[in-house]
Structure formats: structure tokens, C-alpha cells
Amino acid sequence: MVAALALCGCTTERQSNPDRTATEQLLISTAAERAATKLALQMPTGTKVFVDATNFDGVDAKYAIAAIRAHLLEHGSLLVDDKAKAENIVEIRAGALSMDQNALLIGIPQMTLPIPLAGQAVTPEIALFKRDRRLGLAKFAAVGYNVADGKMVASSTPEYGESYETHWLVLLLIGWTTSDVGPDNDPDHPPPDN
């Protein structure tokens, strides 16, 4: 075991130069798409609708609002950009639009050790088993009401969308990733053949 540890090398993969990684953006936008699809099924169809996003906020809110608008169109709503031209107004709100991360490690975590008169040394992580999971989560709700009389025409229960990516590591060296986001997991856009 000591010889194996001595021969092991470390590699670091830089996933992104921007503040946010593409994986983070994919996790959040995929969750938003899934919640938007469910939400659109509950709203009125066949009428002129103005989407009011005043109470909609969160990371990637613009993308999520566009996804809701697109799914409303796909399900028969006729969108207008002016409240005065609308028959119904659909107010959308976001209860969550972000991601969580949790990890499980069986082994020895990375540690910083003080060295007298020399400063500090960082020991590497030794993982017999490690699971690192990131979860994208969206929670959307909406209410639709008639412009003329203000009466409710539709109301949704909160709709959830989730996405995940999990990195696994066993016995220091055997690693793989499972995920439900990205081109490898999109049946409408399969990856190109190499």
C-alpha cells in the first residue's frame, strides 16, 4: 500500500476559467427546463397571455423565464409583450433555482499540518471510497388571472425540476461520473460519432 501511494501522481482538471463552471450552469438550466415543462401544463391555453416575472428571481433567472415562456407557447398559450393586449396574466415565481453539493468520504481527508519553524504542510486526500454529488434544483409556481375581472383562471402547485452529476472514486484510482445533464444525456441531441 505504501509503495502504491508513493507511485501515485495527482492531476488537477481546471473545469472553467469563468466564475461559474459549465457543469453548474447545465445543472441549473436542466432543472429549470424540467420544472418549466411541468408548470406550463397547468396554465390556460388558447388565450393571449402576458407573463409577469416581477416575483421571479434566482441564479440564471433570465434563462428560466425564457424556458417557461417557451413551454407555455408549446402548450398553446399565445404570448404578448404588453399587459394591455393580454386576456390573461400569468404571474410566475421561483422558490428555488440553484444547486446543492454533498460529499461522502471513507478514508483520510486532506489536512493542513503545522510544521515547527517551517510553516505548514498539506497532506493529500486518501479516498478508499468517495462520492461527490452536485444537484441542480428548481421550484416554480404560477397563478393565472383574467385581465378584465381579475378572477383566477389557473393556479399551479409548486413544480420541481432536478438534475445531478456524481463523481465516484474507489481505492484511490478507480473513478467515474454519472450524470443526467449534457449532450451525452440528451436524446434529441446525441453526441457526434468519433
Image (cartoon, rainbow, N blue to C red):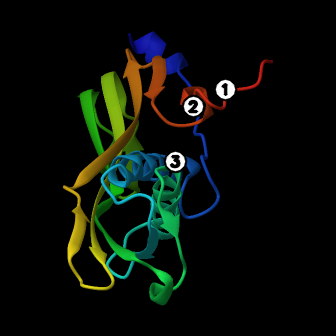
Q: Quadrant of the N terminus?
A: top left
Mark earlier in primary sequence (3, 2): 3
Query: For the residue carrying disc 1, how many other residues have a C-alpha within 10 Å: few (<14), some (14-19), or many (20+)?
Result: few
Q: CA distance from mark 2 to mark 1?
A: 6 Å
Left or right relative to 90: residue 4: right
Query: Where 53 falls versus 189 (above or below)?
Result: below
Per the image, the residue denoted by label 1 is: 190
Q: CA–CA distance between discs 3 and 2?
A: 12 Å
Q: Front-most of 97 and 119?
A: 97
Q: Are marks 3 and 2 in contact (CB under 8 Å)?
A: no
**SS assignment at label 3:** helix
Label 3 is placed on what type of residue? Answer: Leu
Q: Amino acid at mark 2?
A: Asp
Tell me which residue sits at (45%, 76%) in the image: 50
Label 1 – label 3 distance at C-alpha: 16 Å
Residue furthest to the bottom in view is 84
Q: Residues within 10 Å of mark 2 (few under 14, many from 20)?
A: few
Q: Please give the name of the residue rendered at 52% of the width and 47% of the height, measured from the top-left corner.
A: 26
> What mark, if any, has residue 26 been given in the picture?
3
**Residue hosting label 2:** 186
Nearer to me, 12 or 71: 71
Drawn side of residue 99 relative to residue 181, left or right: left
